Image: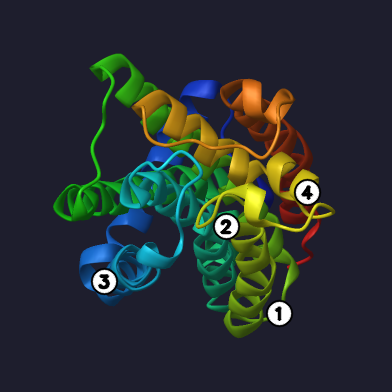
Amino acid sequence: MTATPHAATSPTGGIRQAVSDGLIITWRNLKRIPRIPELAIFAIVQSIMFVLLFAFVFGGAIPLPDGGSYREFLMPGIFAQTVTFAAATTAVGMTDDLNKGIIDRFRSLPMARSAVLSGRTLSDVVYNGGILVVLMLSGLAVGWRVHTGPVEFVGAVALLLLFTYAMSWIGVWVGLSVPSVEVANQVGFTVLFPLTFLSNIFVPTQTLPWWLRPVAEWNPVSALTAATRQLWGNPNPFAAAGFPAEHPILLTLIWVAVLIAIFAPLGVRRYQSMSR
């Protein structure tokens, strides 16, 4: 008795199989970094460029309300900006694999269907974690310091990585919904640049017009930035009292849960509905 083609290519089930297949796809995605080092190099150079420009060019023109160090104020925002752009990285990677037929090949193999998406999001978390290490070393070089203990330091890093994971699911949905890598790149930067600049990354929200302050303070990027500043003991001015100012860590966790709850199902549904 011979097996039908459908039986030969149907994915095996079980959580253990899904985890194993997801880790294999994660490793496959990470192996692209040494093969295409320009991906990491330009991501690191772009982030370091923001550090140097704002720390040395604009830093002297942006005083903080409490007179604190602008460089210590800046660096948590640079970290938050970097992980926010994880969505663009994921979107470009997903679209590239889709256009090259790699995802079609994965879908034909006897592997867990969830592995393609879980492997992509996990690999981008690891990838951005490596970039964060480089940026933290750069921050130490320009004067950034952590004034709290190791628990708070690890807690802030964990928040950054959780936020990376949430943004990666946005990238999954975008990457599976656009026709080309160029469009994925343009969509990502068109949406993410206003999101990061309309926040407390580079300037205190007190400097914004009154009608923009609530938008900036409730911005998920602002919440993440304020949370890391609080955990590291860096300058953390706010325009007014309120939930974002008093509970930035909790607000960040809420945003992470909301983003995953919205975009993970959208990404999975889009992946399942693709007719190939």
Q: Amino acid at mark 4?
A: Val
User: At numbered mark 1, what does the secondary structure look like: helix, strand or loop?
Assistant: loop
Going from the N terminus, do you reach mark 4 or mark 3 first? 3
User: At numbered mark 3, what does the secondary structure look like: helix, strand or loop?
Assistant: helix
Q: Which residue is mark 1?
A: 179
Mark 2 in CB contact with mark 4 (< 8 angstroms): no
Quarter of the image with the C terminus in it: bottom right
Eye-nearest disc, 1 or 2: 2
Distance from the alpha carbon under mark 1 to that under mark 2? 17 Å
Image quarter of residue 265: top right
Q: Residues within 10 Å of mark 3 (few under 14, many from 20)?
A: few
Going from the N terminus, do you reach mark 1 or mark 3 first? 3
Q: Residue at x 14, y 53 (%)?
A: 141
Q: In the image, residue 179 lies at what x, y percent?
A: 71, 79
Reply above or below: 114 against 96: above
Q: Residues within 10 Å of mark 4 (few under 14, many from 20)?
A: some
Mark 3 in CB contact with mark 2 (< 8 angstroms): no
Q: Which residue is mark 4?
A: 215
